[in-house]
Image: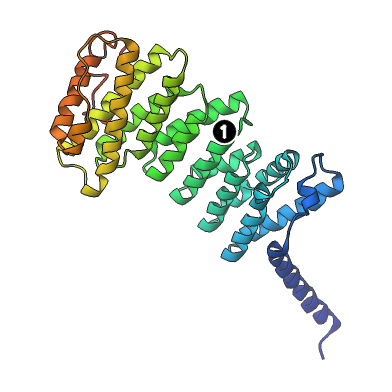
């Protein structure tokens, strides 16, 4: 016959297992009441306790590592953002509460846990998640860095960061972009920089730095740079009085991209299935150069367009057009030097003062 102590030990163990199973299965059953979601007021102490319990159950589900539990926990945390009638006050309090609990999940060895943690941060932008996002941006997996980059983009776009935090995180992002090899991560990082309106000079600086990556990796996609260049052009083109320095920096960045992409195509360094982004950056750079030429009032003969040579895939002709643009930029009012426009070295050059 089993002793009472033995029975109590087994009973205690079974209770713990049952409670764990209830905690994990609760993620699939948990829902926040519509009245709570629509509440325009600050939470009462009891409401905060109940909502924190809900959040903790979802965090436990994500930490569990089981795919179905992770998916359910992530969905339960991000569903309020898609719920009609949810109040801004609720979302602000809820995002802060969730954001403060994400950093611990980023220590998980399980890649699925880290990826989904960043997806939650992406859906609930709040400064409370900033430390977790920073860990995501530094993760060894591009699968984690991508949603982390989208999360920091959303956070910068939301305007919730202080001026000091914004400056600090933009400097970090600029360094990350300069060293990032995965094109799918570079794009949201550039979008994050562009989310700050008074950041044009820094965006152009990092685009200049990215030239080195493309010198070393001719097959790398120019798609993120082309998109960022178009965004900068749109920003300067719609400004009432665009900064002359930024227009000239735009011209320099564009000329360097144009001549490098054209040479790589002409030299056969780009695989056939990778030419599209090279053509994209050539087109974007050409349009940006035409804008800078008109804006700064150059008296040099404007080089011809790249449209026809691109259609004919006449890459040597595009190289000649790019070289003509280099000559234009070496004259008044740009006065760039050969070193300023160099694309033969992977080390980024600083424009001459």
| Residue at the image point whose x is 38% and y is 37% from the top | 224
Graded by Cα atoms within 10 Å as few (under 14), some (14 to 19) or many (20 or more), the crowding at tag 1 reads some
Figure quadrant of residue 284: top left
Residue 300 x, y percent position in the rendering: 21, 11
**In this picture, is 172 found above or below 75?**
above
Q: Position of residue 28 (x, y in %)?
A: 68, 64
Residue 1, position as x, y percentages in the image: 82, 91
Q: Quadrant of residue 231?
A: top left
Task: Please tell me whether residue 279 is drawn above or below residue 301 in the rendered image.
Answer: below
For the point 30% across and 40% down, the residue is 277
Pinpoint residue 263: horizontal percent, then vertical percent.
18, 33
The C terminus - image quarter: top left
| Viewer-proximal residue among 70 and 13 | 70
Furthest-bottom residue in view? 1
Q: Is residue 95 visible?
A: yes
Please give left or right for residue 184 compared with residue 292 in the image: right
User: Measuring 59% from the left and 65% from the top, which residue is drawn there?
Assistant: 68
Task: State the residue in front, 293 or 162.
Answer: 293
Q: Is residue 209 left or right of residue 59?
A: left
Badge 1 element: helix
Numbered disc total: 1
The residue singled out by tag 1 in the image is: 157
Which one is in front, 124 or 347?
124
**In the image, what residue occupies the spot 22% across and 20% down?**
325
Can you see residue 351?
Answer: no
């Amino acid at each position: 016959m089993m002793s009472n102590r033995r029975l109590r030990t087994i009973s205690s163990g079974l209770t713990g297992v049952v409670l764990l199973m209830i905690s994990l299965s609760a993620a699939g059953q948990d829902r926040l009441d519509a009245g709570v979601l629509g509440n325009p007021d600050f939470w009462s102490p009891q409401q905060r306790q109940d909502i924190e319990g809900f959040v903790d159950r979802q965090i436990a589900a994500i930490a569990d590592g089981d795919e179905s539990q992770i998916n359910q926990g992530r969905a339960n945390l991000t569903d309020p953002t898609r719920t009609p009638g949810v109040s801004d006050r609720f979302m602000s309090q809820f995002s802060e509460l969730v954001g403060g609990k994400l950093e611990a999940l980023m220590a998980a060895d399980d890649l699925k846990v880290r990826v989904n943690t960043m997806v939650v941060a992406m859906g609930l932008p709040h400064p409370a998640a900033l430390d977790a996002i920073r860990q995501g941006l530094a993760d060894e997996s591009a699968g984690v860095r991508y949603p982390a980059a989208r999360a920091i983009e959303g956070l910068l776009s939301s305007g919730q960061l202080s001026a000091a935090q914004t400056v600090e995180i933009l400097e970090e992002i600029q360094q990350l972009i300069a060293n990032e090899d995965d094109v799918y991560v570079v794009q949201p990082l550039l979008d994050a920089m562009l989310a700050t309106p008074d950041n044009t000079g820094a965006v152009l600086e990092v685009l200049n730095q990215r030239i080195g990556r493309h010198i070393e990796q001719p097959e790398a996609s120019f798609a993120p740079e082309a998109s960022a260049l178009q965004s900068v052009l749109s920003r300067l083109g719609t400004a009432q009085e665009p900064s002359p320095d930024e227009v000239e920096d735009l011209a320099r960045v564009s000329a360097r991209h144009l001549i490098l992409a054209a040479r790589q195509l002409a030299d056969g360094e780009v695989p056939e299935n990778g030419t599209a982004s090279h053509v994209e950056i050539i087109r974007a750079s050409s349009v940006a150069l035409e804008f800078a030429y008109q804006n700064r009032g150059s008296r040099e003969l404007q080089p011809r367009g790249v449209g026809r040579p691109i259609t004919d895939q006449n890459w040597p002709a595009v190289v000649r057009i790019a070289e003509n643009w280099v000559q234009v930029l070496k004259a008044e009012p740009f006065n760039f030097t050969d070193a300023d426009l160099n694309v033969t070295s992977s080390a980024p050059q600083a424009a001459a003062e």
